[in-house]
Amino acid sequence: MTGLRILRNIRRAPCRSRHRRKYCPCTTRPHFAPARAIPKVSRPTRIGNNGGIVYDSPIYVPGHNGLVGSAIVRRLRADGVSRLLLRTHDELDLRRQTDVERFFAEQRPQYVFLAAAKVGGIEANRSHPAQFLRDNLQIQTNVIDAAYRHGTRKLLFLGSSCIYPRLAPQPIPEDSLLTGPLEPTNEWYAIAKIAGLKMCQAYRREFQFDAICAMPTNLYGPGDNFSLVDSHVLPALIRKCHEGKLRHAEAVEVWGSGTPRREFLHVDDLADACVFLMRQYSDEGPVNVGWGQDVSIAELARLVADTVGFEGELHFDRSKPDGTPRKLLDTSRLTALGWQPKIALHAGLASTYDWFRAHQEQLRR
């Protein structure tokens, strides 16, 4: 009787080779597993069967309150998408695997724009390397795996241009990945993002899961983090120049020498590119998303000062790190697919400053 009771409490399960048979053809033996060990999941649509975005399907945007996620939500709503699945961090902590599993099992999103990430500037990366590595690995691993196993048709993973080597050829082509050492000031974040990209590629190869990867350049726009502690260079400059103007300051400080060159893309352009790629692209190779031109940090600082109306001096603190000497993406792959950005830097700065002034009370201090 004991043996019969044991057999009643277990069920047959597919082996790791995903055979759905009573006897595994690999071993010709019946194999068993505890009922709780095999979660019930949907079989995902295989690559090439999705036919672009079906707009009446549920679409999940992790990180929808952030810079990138909020822009993607704006873009989807402009297209008439109504079945958006949106959860705040308090409602769903993506670092907790069981919570993510429960969400995907209940909501069954068909498309996922994975915009959630722990992000920050040089000082934030330098001060919290463990958090940048741990949190991003947890978020992307939980979401990508749950999306695959619960039947998501297609997932777009957002990486970063910091995944490329510090001294990569300029403009940086996608095949520069893993060809040299990373920039030390953000290597923890970069390693996590490389792992996410490789996870998408591995799931395509082994499970035929339609996961694609976009690698955006430096971003800015409405919804950015304007904190002077952990923000990126452009929003920090906007806030410094704005506060300097209000104080009638003689000068504001700019980190570094001002010589590094950076490329900047308005986040609404990125959102448009993400929707375009979700519709048009299905391959394992990452796709760079950028403007195609760069400026020096000194040129950017002066452009920000002119936009804000700050008339004082710019003092460059050479004791602060510069980061990568130059970072300009080769966007020829995306251009060949038929997409190009629309928002020029001067126009984007003006609209971003207008948004900053209108939302000062809501911004992180």
Image (cartoon, rainbow, N blue to C red):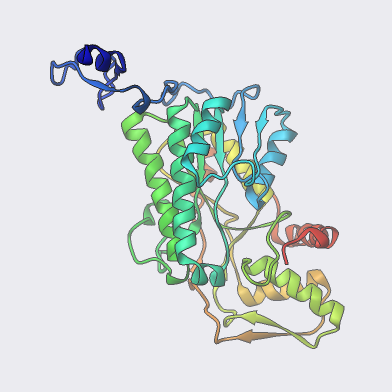
What is the quadrant of the N terminus in the image?
top left
Image spot of residue 13 (x, y percent): 29, 19
Residue at 84%, 78% in the rendered image: 245
Identify whether 256 is placed above or below 181.
below
Between 198 and 179, the one nearer to me in the picture: 198
Between 5 and 293, the one nearer to me in the picture: 5
Residue at 75%, 70% in the rendered image: 239
Identify whether 360 is placed above or below 197.
below
What is the quadrant of the C terminus in the image?
bottom right
Identify whether 231 is placed above or below 87.
below
Image spot of residue 111 (x, y percent): 55, 30
Residue at 48%, 52% in the rendered image: 136
User: Extreme left residue here?
Assistant: 28
The quadrant holding residue 44 is: top left
The quadrant holding residue 319 is: bottom right
Between 130 and 360, the one nearer to me in the picture: 130
Whether residue 341 is visible to the viewer of this picture, yes or no, is no
User: Extreme front residue here?
Assistant: 1
Identify whether 54 is placed above or below 365.
above
Whether residue 322 is visible to the viewer of this picture, yes or no, is yes
Q: Is residue 119 left or right of residue 82?
A: left
Image spot of residue 261 (x, y percent): 56, 71
- Label tally: 0
Image spot of residue 213 (x, y percent): 47, 43
Q: Is residue 270 left or right of residue 43?
A: right
